Image (spheres, rainbow, N blue to C red):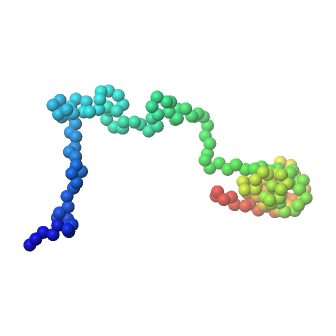
Amino acid sequence: MEKSEGKFGLHNLTCPAGAHKKKKLLGRGPSSGHGKTSTRGSKGQTSRAGRDFYLGLEGGQSPIARRIPKRGFVSRFKKEYQLVKLSDLNKLKESTITLDLLQEKGLIKNKIKLVKILGDGEIKRPVSVCVHAFSKKASQCIINAGGTIKVIPSKRE
């Protein structure tokens, strides 16, 4: 039978020349050329076993972990509210108070951000208030005046 040279198969696959290098044997005596310091030079961070450069190494520059201040703690999940007092709501003539109305009257800057009603002052008439949060005193005052409160769920929750 004649061999067909055009067909490939597992029986006639070969690696290209130079694809497999022999492993460099280190620390096998002075005659090997890789003895004594085993091609690592002498002394220093890179000659030691384990990692060459630790995470955050910035050469001679002071690392960022040492440059930034270390005081206090700020939660990534902190909610920042735009605050509105009950005394401010008392000045409004409308019976239904929404985010749009609060922004229109200039009591809040942005209706997309969270809004909270605080219990500073009094409310003398029944109003319906729709915002993201109320203090305990504010919700009691509004309900005692005959009004209603509605908590809008924030998009972050």
Q: Position of residue 106 (x, y in %)?
A: 83, 52
Quarter of the image with the C terminus in it: bottom right
| Residue at horizontal 35 percent and vertical 28 percent from the top | 44
Q: Let me know if residue 86 appears in the view.
A: no
Q: Is residue 129 above or below residue 75?
A: below
Q: Nearer the viewer, residue 136 or 130?
A: 130
In terms of image quadrants, where is residue 68? top right
Q: Count of labels shown?
A: 0
Q: Position of residue 154 (x, y in %)?
A: 68, 58
Q: Nearer the viewer, residue 47 or 114?
A: 47
Q: Position of residue 87 (x, y in %)?
A: 87, 50
| Residue at horizontal 20 percent and vertical 61 percent from the top | 13
In terms of image quadrants, where is residue 9? bottom left
Q: Position of residue 130 (x, y in %)?
A: 78, 61
| Residue at horizontal 46 percent and vertical 28 percent from the top | 60
Quarter of the image with the N terminus in it: bottom left
Residue at the outermost bottom position: 1
Q: Nearer the viewer, residue 88 or 16?
A: 16
Q: Is residue 119 above or below residue 95?
A: above
Q: Let me know if residue 8 appears in the view.
A: yes
Q: Nearer the viewer, residue 122 or 30?
A: 30
